[in-house]
Image: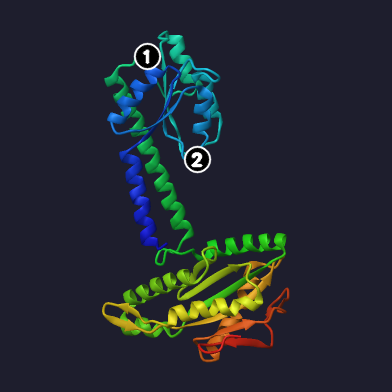
Amino acid sequence: MSDAKSTVLQSLNTELVSSFPRVLIAEDDAMSRKILQSWLENWGYRVTVAENGALAWNIVQCEDSPELLILDWVMPEIDGIELCRKIRDREHSPYQYILLATARNEKQDLVRGLEAGADDYLTKPLDRSELRARLRVGERILTLQRDLIRAREDVRFQATHDALTGIWNRGTILELLQREQERAARTQSATGILMLDLDHFKQVNDTYGHLSGDEVLHEVAQRISQAVRSYDLVARYGGEEFLIVLPGCREDQILGCAEQVRSAIASTPVVVHNSEIPVTVSIGATVAAGGATAEMDIVAVADAALYQAKNSGRNRTVLSDAGWQISPVSLHPPERVREAGRANVA
C-alpha cells in the first residue's frame, strides 16, 4: 500500500470514529437497555449492549472495544463498581470513558463510584437531555486523547523516518538490523543486505535542480519499496544511498532480489516537471549469518561491495562472498566478488 493511500485511509478512519462514536451499554434490565439503545442510535452512536457485567468485561477486553461506556451499578456476575476497577487496573490504550448509572444518590455513593474509576455519574431514572450532555463531555475528552495520540505518533514517525522519502532513516535501520541479527541467531537463518547508491546523482542535481533531485529520491524510494517483500526493511542511509535489510535471504537468493530492485529503478525514467530523468543504481550485496557481528561491520561489507560495483561500471550488483571476515581493526572484504548487471544475474 502506498504512503499516500495509507494516509487517506487513516484520515477516513479517524473521521469515521469521530463522527460515529461507539458506546457500550451494560444494563441488566431489558427495558432500560432498549430505551438507552434507542436514544443513542437516534443520536448517531454505534451501540454495543451487554446484559450483565461479565459480558461487558469480555467486550471491553477486545482490541476494538468501545471508548464510551455506560455501566449500571447493579448487575449480575460483575457489578458496575467492580467492572470500573477491573477496567482501570488493566493496562489499556486508548482510555475508555465511563459513565456509571445508578438509583443511588447519596454523596458517599457518588464518591465511591468515582474512586472506583468512573469518570461521571448518572442517577436513575435517566434524563434524556442530561445523558446526551454528559456523553458529549466524554466525547470531548476522547477527542483530546485522540489528538494527543496522533501528535505522539507524528513525533515518533519523524524520529524514525526520513523526512523526504518517508522510509526508515539511518539510525532506525541500524537498530532494526541489530534486532534482525538477533532473531536470525535464534532461528539459525541469514540476513541479506543491499547497499544502493544512485549513479551520477550529482549530475541530476546540477542539470535539473535540487528540487527535482528530491523528487527523484522520493520516487526511487517508492520503487524500492514496491520491488521488495512486504516485510523487508528499506531505509535512506544518507544522501543518495539506500539500505535494504532482507530477513531470511540466503546467498543464492540475494542476487535475484538485487536485480528486482535494480531493474525497477532503471527500467523507466523518473518524470519530473515534464522531464524524463534516467536513473540507475549500483548495489553492494552481502549475506550475514545470525550472530554477534556488529551491524556496522555488516554494512561496511556491503558498502565495500558497492564501491566495487561503481568502479566496475555502475548499474550493476557486486556480491561479497559469504566468507568475509572482520578484524578488530579494519574490514577485509573478499578478494573475489560476483557481479550481476542488467543482463547477467548469477
Up-down relation of residue 198 to residue 135 (above or below)? below
State left or right for residue 115 relative to residue 126.
right
Q: Position of residue 302 (x, y in %)?
A: 60, 77
Up-down relation of residue 23 to residue 2 (above or below)? above
Residue at (69% x, 88% y) in the render: 335
Q: Residue furthest bottom?
A: 313
| Mark 1 burial class by Cα count in 10 Å: few <14, some 14-19, many 20+ | some
Q: Quadrant of the N terminus?
A: bottom left
| Mark 2 burial class by Cα count in 10 Å: few <14, some 14-19, many 20+ | few
Separation of residues labelled 1 and 2 (CA atoms): 30 Å
Q: Secondary structure at mark 2?
A: loop
Q: Position of residue 177 (x, y in %)?
A: 60, 64
State left or right for residue 85 relative to residue 101.
right
For residue 341, the mark is: none
Residue at (46% x, 15% y) in the render: 111
Please tell me whether mark 1 or mark 2 is closer to you in this view. Answer: 2
Q: Which residue is mark 2?
A: 63
Q: Which residue is mark 1?
A: 123
As rendered, which of 239 and 130 lies closer to the eye? Answer: 130
The three-letter code of the residue at mark 2 reads: Glu
Quarter-of-image position of residue 301: bottom right
Up-down relation of residue 190 to residue 146 (above or below)? below
The three-letter code of the residue at mark 1 reads: Thr
